[in-house]
């Protein structure tokens, strides 16, 4: 482990970023920018509030419990029968796992390669089987995330965003000032879209795996509050830069982007339209890399949960939980991005408000004792 705390902070910040950054983080900033051409600034602020900033608060809150999200929720949510928190965790895990983010990642990864001569179902089968093999060793990919994979993903996104910044639109840009009602509508829609990457949900339920890694690699940092806050702040800054750049550029070029592009192909279409087809391969690689890394992390988190709560622990229990997760995810991926979004939207409406309430309450609990 690095002796320099700055490099330690970067390592774990990129690890957190790599675990979270997946399909929703790629798709929804572009959707937000497409609807906010009149005022991208309002869209960026609103999106960051409900995504990156809320996730930072969640990371800070759950880190006070060393990543034990169950204890965190029990401390901050009212319970009348004792089943409320376990049910909320189950709903959240389904959203992150086989009914939500895992199939969504495989669908978006397929959308990044439109010229592949295979069906989405066959691609998802191969994609999920490969991630299954990697996830069998719970620490294999996670150990490489912060050092190589996540920094590479961030670097490619930075290149695409910066390169797009210097491109002038080839179409006439019509700048129509937004009315007060229009600004309010942009802010509200962007705030709404900011929930769909599930950053808060991910950072809460990834916390146990993250702190397990921290215990293995830097046990002296477990109780270092300044270090943990720094990790969360740097990770938030990474997300904020990517979100802001993608929203602004999607807003800037929204009038020239192709119409009726499916959600899973949005980013690729955006890159091809702005930077040309020669950089399409770069977009395909970065989308696939982000979705692959996040899928492995999601499989580990959900399989850990299944093994702990529903399986009798033995040498085959994790394998069985992981295999079941992959099979359900593969089945759900058949329904496409819109089908998965239909399910996750309803689960989010049930569970997300409670996670936000618990996070805000923990922040106020801390403020009251200062």
Image: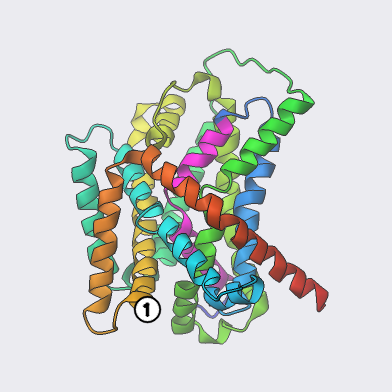
Is 10 in the magenta?
yes
Reading the image, the residue beneath label 1 is 308
Q: Total marks drawn?
A: 1
Vertical arrangement, residue 88 with respect to residue 329, above or below: below
Q: Tell me residue 245's x, y (percent).
A: 58, 40
Please give left or right for residue 137 compared with residue 145 in the image. Answer: left
Residue at 35 percent of width and 27 percent of height: 277
Q: Is residue 167 above or below residue 171?
A: below
Foreground of the two, 247 or 311:
311
Quadrant of res 306: bottom left
Residue that appears at 76% across and 69% down:
364
Q: Which residues are magenta?
A: 6-33
Residue lying at the far front in this picture: please name it.
Answer: 81
For the C terminus, the image quarter is bottom right
Q: Position of residue 253 (x, y in %)?
A: 54, 25
Q: Dot 1, how many residues are within 10 Å of its Cα: few (below 14), some (14-19), or many (20+)? A: some
- Most prominent secondary structure in the magenta stretch? helix
Q: Nearer the viewer, residue 116 or 209?
A: 209
Residue 157: image location, x then y, percent: 47, 45
Q: Position of residue 24 (x, y in %)?
A: 46, 46
Residue 227 in view here:
yes
**Residue visible at 64% across and 59% down in the picture:** 356
**Image: 326 above or below 60:** above
**Outermost residue, bottom side:** 220
Q: What residue is shown at x 56% (from left), y 80% (from top)?
A: 66
Whether residue 67 is visible, yes or no, is: no
Examine the image and state in which quarter residue 95 appears.
bottom left
Q: Is residue 118 left or right of residue 273?
A: left
Side of 110 where 48 appears, left or right: right
Q: Which residue lies most toward the top here?
A: 172
Q: SS for tag 1?
A: helix
């Amino acid at each position: 482990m690095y002796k320099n705390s700055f490099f330690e902070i970067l390592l774990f910040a990129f690890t957190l970023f790599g675990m979270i950054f997946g399909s929703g983080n790629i798709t929804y900033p572009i959707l937000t920018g497409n609807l906010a051409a009149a005022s991208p600034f309002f869209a960026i602020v609103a999106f960051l509030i409900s995504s990156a900033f809320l996730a930072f608060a969640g990371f800070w809150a759950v880190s006070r419990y060393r990543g034990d999200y169950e204890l965190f929720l029990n401390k901050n949510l009212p319970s009348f029968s004792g089943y409320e928190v376990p049910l909320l965790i189950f709903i959240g895990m389904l959203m992150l796992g086989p009914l939500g983010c895992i199939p969504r990642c495989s669908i978006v990864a397929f959308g990044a390669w439109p010229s592949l001569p295979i069906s989405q179902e066959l691609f998802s089968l191969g994609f999920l089987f490969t991630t299954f093999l990697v996830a069998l060793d719970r620490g294999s990919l996670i150990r490489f995330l912060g050092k190589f994979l996540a920094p590479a993903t961030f670097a490619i996104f930075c290149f695409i965003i910066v390169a797009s910044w210097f491109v002038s639109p080839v179409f006439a840009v019509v700048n129509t000032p937004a009315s007060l009602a229009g600004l309010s509508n942009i802010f509200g829609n962007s705030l709404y879209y900011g929930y769909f990457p599930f950053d808060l949900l991910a950072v809460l339920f990834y916390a146990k795996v993250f702190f397990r890694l921290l215990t293995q690699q830097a046990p002296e940092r477990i109780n270092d509050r300044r270090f943990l806050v720094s990790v969360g702040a740097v990770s938030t800054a990474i997300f904020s830069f990517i979100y802001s750049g993608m929203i602004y550029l999607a807003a800037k070029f929204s009038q020239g982007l192709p119409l009726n592009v499916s959600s899973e192909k949005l980013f690729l279409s955006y890159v091809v339209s702005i930077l040309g087809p020669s950089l399409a391969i770069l977009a395909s690689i970065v989308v696939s890399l982000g979705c692959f890394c996040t899928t492995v992390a999601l499989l580990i988190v959900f399989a850990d949960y299944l093994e702990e709560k529903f399986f009798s622990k033995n040498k085959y229990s994790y394998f069985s939980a992981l295999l079941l997760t992959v099979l359900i995810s593969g089945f759900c991926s058949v329904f496409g991005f819109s089908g998965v979004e239909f399910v996750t939207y309803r689960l989010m409406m049930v569970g997300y408000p409670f996670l936000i309430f618990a996070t805000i309450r923990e922040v106020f609990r801390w403020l009251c004792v200062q």
